[in-house]
Image (cartoon, grey):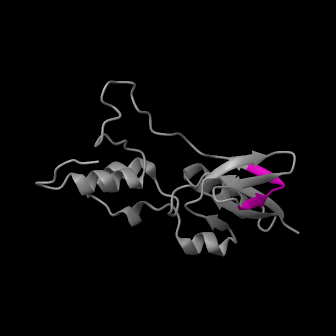
Amino acid sequence: MSEPLVIIGNGMAATRLVDGLTTLAPGRYAIAVVGEEPSLAYNRVLLSSVLAREVEAKDIELKTAAWWRDRGVTLVYGRRAVEIDTRARFVRLRGGAKLGYAKLVVATGSEAVRLPLAGADLPGVVTFRDKADVNTILSRARPGARWRA
């Protein structure tokens, strides 16, 4: 029987870990990957290329949905992990759902830093960290567009 493994974080580190585990120890783990963003894992380094319209957002995905499915990985998109109970061995997701685990990996990366400067919290000031930020910038940066919150 496979050990339940929950990975919190749906980015480059989680993808690499799943690739390694499913190659070196196929079937050993029943893997669930939890990601707050509502999409497949992607290469954040290439977000500037998406912003520059040099590539499409789909072109920076690390692995296809079929790749994850073929490895038996359960992807939990658009759900934030809000609690880890190490005694009862579960992760609670926003909305209340629980995922039990035998092993847990936290691979959440970093968050965008907002500089502690006057005006940093004004409407129209956005970070540049994920696909949602790129979409916000692109929607507001078209010719003739006015920045509004």
- Please identify the quadrant where the N terminus is shown: bottom right
Give the side of residue 47 with respect to residue 34, left or right. left
Q: Quadrant of residue 77?
A: bottom right
Q: Position of residue 132 (x, y in %)?
A: 40, 54
Q: Position of residue 94 (x, y in %)?
A: 63, 56
Prevalent SS, magenta region? strand
Give the vertical position of 25 relative to 69 (above or below). above
Give the vertical position of 110 relative to 136 (above or below). above
Q: Residue at x 33, y 31 (%)?
A: 120
Q: Which residues are magenta?
A: 97-104
Q: Residue furthest left?
A: 144
Give the side of residue 31 with respect to residue 54, left or right. right
Give the vertical position of 84 relative to 35 (above or below). above
**In the foreground, 138 or 45:** 138
Q: Position of residue 92 (x, y in %)?
A: 72, 54
Q: Quadrant of residue 86?
A: top right
